[in-house]
Image (cartoon, rainbow, N blue to C red):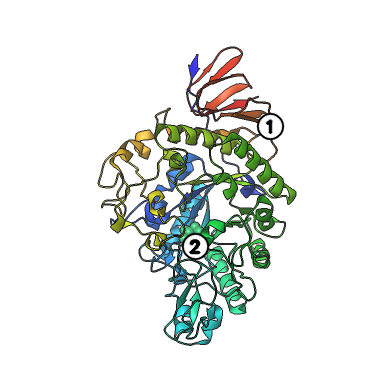
């Protein structure tokens, strides 16, 4: 008998407030510019998202995370904010944001917004005043240069996007920007910076948002004296060591203050840290009691298709977060990395692995973040015309890879239209023609599709009590195969490029590929996963 199991009963919504909703939440990341365009300018917007929220609901997610939609010159896709309390006209208005939050809540979805506290836009009124010589200068990092005429940067720090992390201003001093020159770093030693961000958090909490994704949560505090690093290619060191500009212990004080603020609001408002820490233990510091609720687990994202490394990373992640009583987050893709179908090798193999990895991660204890389009099995778009690329790193040599546009191509909703249902005009980045067949409409109702696999997995995650938060234990398995149990549940992942025969681990409830079963055994094809009820 060959079965491909992709259907599952849709579970009931939990009623009433639930303690610790975030501990096992599935949070769907919306890249605002590329989700749905309501006004035909080729760029996604808030009303477009509101109209498409039913897709997220039907998928079975608990919440959406929206990337920045605030007033911004868009030097870095909105991560350069000029006004934290205004919606950029490109994306709509404040009342559109309000309508989005209301509609999400009506549907039973929570809303998390992005907050960008490490830097502002160079067009932010504070920075403009700083350049004009005002006292706002103290809110950034201005320093005289080195060399006889101050013609050299104050230290050897490099921008994550490449090139020096300093730009010289007209008056001769240099200012620090860990990202693009249009993103000057704030000085978090200044009390006005603390006060301003607490006020901004309150602004959005009062509007009803359920939490924040904290951009560069590991970067706000710099080592005293801004010491040299003494090495080049510093972007490659991020995530492998503590740097004088990343993962400094002082950031935790800010997070503790924000946690107190969040806890003063009703309804369990949360914060998730985007923190690139050198180890699972350092990452767990961000989610200690009294700090943030979650931190993205990039250790798993970067560990590749390797059973031993996957297992070791799961163990390290769970041990580190477990030690501080926090849940782990699982994330395979986001707007900064190559989509995982492509990371796993692309083509049919990449998709096969991606589907299996999805079942594996969604079965692990903790919360999961999905990136828009991964439920469609979208690959990275590798051939984009250079003149359309927006990633600031693309324009600057030798930094972060600079090709982050390929994971930001607008979503195909239908098989027809100038942008496959994204909007009425050509999208800001062209979609490959093959995406016609990957659209939401094309995949809906097709039991073999990746979309239906995600829907079934998320429905089962609600239905089976052993999934989500809780414990797991590894089961014996041959080399290259990972198997683990949860209460009443098991998951098996075959990472090998060939079929393996395994004894039945229970009653199969979902498979990432066609699996053969007989009375005693299952034949798992290459790079596939099975969920079992036991
Ligand atoms: C974060 C964002 C990324 C942005 C950077 C600077 O890493 O995810 O998109 O470029 O911060 O704000």
Point out residue 522 in the picture as x, y percentages from the top left corner: 57, 18
Q: Quick check: can you spot residue 17?
A: no
Looking at the image, residue 252 sits to the left or right of residue 154; the answer is right
**Callout 2: CB less than 8 Å from ligand 1:** yes
Q: As rendered, which of 176 and 217 lies closer to the eye?
A: 176
Pointer 2 and pointer 1: residues touching (CB < 8 Å)? no
Toward the top, the furthest residue is 519
Tell me the element at label 1. strand
Q: Taking 241 as reference, is 59 above or below it?
A: above
Q: Mark 1 points at which residue?
A: 474
Q: Which residue is nearer to you in this view: 95 or 522?
A: 522
Q: Nearer the viewer, residue 55 or 476?
A: 476
Q: SS of the residue at dot 2?
A: loop
Which residue is identified by label 2? 160
Q: Position of residue 464 (x, y in %)?
A: 62, 32
**Is disc 2 surrounded by few (<14), some (14 to 19) or many (20+) residues within 10 Å?**
many
């Amino acid at each position: 008998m060959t079965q491909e199991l992709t259907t599952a009963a849709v579970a009931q919504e939990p009623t009433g407030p639930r303690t610790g909703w975030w501990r096992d939440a599935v949070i769907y990341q919306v890249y605002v510019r590329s989700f749905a365009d309501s006004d035909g300018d080729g760029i996604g917007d808030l009303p477009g998202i509101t109209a498409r929220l039913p897709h997220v609901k039907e998928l079975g997610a608990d919440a959406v995370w929206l990337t920045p939609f605030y007033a911004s010159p868009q030097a870095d896709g909105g991560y350069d904010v000029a006004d934290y309390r205004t919606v950029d006209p490109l994306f709509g208005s404040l009342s559109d944001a309000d309508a989005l939050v209301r509609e999400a809540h009506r549907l039973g979805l929570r809303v998390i917004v992005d907050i960008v506290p490490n830097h502002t836009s160079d067009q932010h009124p504070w920075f403009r005043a700083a350049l004009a010589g005002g006292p706002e200068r103290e809110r950034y990092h201005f320093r005289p240069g080195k060399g006889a005429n101050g013609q050299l940067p104050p230290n050897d720090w490099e921008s994550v996007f490449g090139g020096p992390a300093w730009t010289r201003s007209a008056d001769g001093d240099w200012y620090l920007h860990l990202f693009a020159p249009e993103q000057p770093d704030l000085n978090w030693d200044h009390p006005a910076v603390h006060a301003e961000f607490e006020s901004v958090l309150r602004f959005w909490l009062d509007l009803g948002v359920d939490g924040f994704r904290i951009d560069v949560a590991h970067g706000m505090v710099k080592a005293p004296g801004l010491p040299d690093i003494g090495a080049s290619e510093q972007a490659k060191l991020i995530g492998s060591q503590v740097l004088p500009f990343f993962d400094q212990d002082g950031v935790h004080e800010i997070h503790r203050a924000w946690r107190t603020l969040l806890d003063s609001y009703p309804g369990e408002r949360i914060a998730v840290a985007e923190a690139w820490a050198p180890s699972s233990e350092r990452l767990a510091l961000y989610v200690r009691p009294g700090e943030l609720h979650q931190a993205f687990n990039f250790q798993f994202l970067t560990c590749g298709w390797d059973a031993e490394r996957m297992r070791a990373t799961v163990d390290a992640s769970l041990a580190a977060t477990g030690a501080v009583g926090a849940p782990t987050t699982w994330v395979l893709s986001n707007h900064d990395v190559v989509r995982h179908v492509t990371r796993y090798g692309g083509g049919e193999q990449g998709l096969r692995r991606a589907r299996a990895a999805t079942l594996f991660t969604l079965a692990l204890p903790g919360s999961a973040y999905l990136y828009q389009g991964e439920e469609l099995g979208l690959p990275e778009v590798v051939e984009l015309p250079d003149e359309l690329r927006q990633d600031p790193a693309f324009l600057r040599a030798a930094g972060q890879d600079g090709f982050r546009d390929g994971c930001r191509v607008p979503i195909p909703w239908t098989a027809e239209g100038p942008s496959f249902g994204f909007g009425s005009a050509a999208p800001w980045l062209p979609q490959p023609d093959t995406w016609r067949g990957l659209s939401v409409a094309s995949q809906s109702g097709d039991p073999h599709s990746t979309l239906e696999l995600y829907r079934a997995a998320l429905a089962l995650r609600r239905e089976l009590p052993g999934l989500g938060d809780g414990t797991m234990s590894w089961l014996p398995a041959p080399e290259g195969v990972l198997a683990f149990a949860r209460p009443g549940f098991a998951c098996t992942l075959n990472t090998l490029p060939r079929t393996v025969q395994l004894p039945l681990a229970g009653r199969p409830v979902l498979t990432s590929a066609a699996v053969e079963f007989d009375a005693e055994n299952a034949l798992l094809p290459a790079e596939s996963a099975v969920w079992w009820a036991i």
